[in-house]
Image (cartoon, helix red, strand yellow):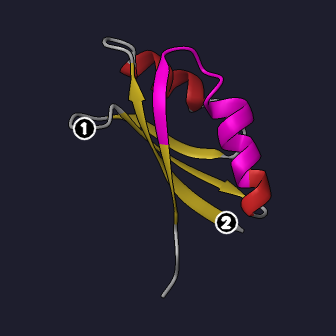
Amino acid sequence: MVQAYILIQTEVGKAAEVAREIGGIPGVTLAEDVTGPYDVIVRAEARNVDELGKLVVAQIQAVEGITRTLTCPIVHI
């Protein structure tokens, strides 16, 4: 299982709507609107890195109102 945090920038005024919509996507375990340089922080999981990439590109980035994403895979050191 691969887990990651996805940091999202949105169009002005769209953070809550984007977080709500992303929260319903299978594989997303948490989606919160926040303040700071990013507008939404998502925690997601997938069986492997390829599936995580597909989740981000095909489903999360397809949500209207998103301008940029940064995916940060979780590592266990």
Q: Quadrant of residue 23?
A: top right
Q: Is residue 8 visible?
A: yes
Q: Position of residue 37 (x, y in %)?
A: 25, 37
Determine whether the residue tagged by mark 1 lies in a helix, strand or loop. loop
Question: Would you place residue 52 above or below residue 32 in this image?
Answer: below
The residues bearing labels 2 and 1 have C-alpha atoms spaced at a distance of 25 Å
Task: Tell me the residue that label 1 is attached to.
Answer: 37
x 49%, y 38%: residue:
69
Question: Would you place residue 17 above or below residue 71 in this image?
Answer: above
State the residue in front, 31 or 64: 64
Q: Quadrant of residue 9?
A: top left
Question: Would you place residue 68 above or below residue 55 in this image?
Answer: above
Horizontally, residue 14 falls left or right of residue 20, namely: left
Asked if the stretch drawn in magenta spans residue 58, the answer is yes
Q: Amino acid at mark 1?
A: Pro
Determine whether the residue tagged by mark 2 lies in a helix, strand or loop. strand
x 57%, y 22%: residue:
21
Q: What's the mark number on residue 64? A: none
State the residue in front, 21 or 9: 9
Task: Tell me the residue that label 2 is attached to.
Answer: 2
Horizontally, residue 45 falls left or right of residue 47, namely: left
Q: Amino acid at mark 2?
A: Val
Q: Position of residue 39 (x, y in %)?
A: 33, 31
Q: Position of residue 32 (x, y in %)?
A: 40, 36
Query: Which residue is at the far left?
Result: 36
What segment carries the magenta color?
Answer: 52-69
Question: Are the residues at dot 2 and dot 1 in contact (C-beta closer than 8 Å)?
Answer: no
x 65%, y 41%: residue:
56
x 62%, y 32%: residue:
60
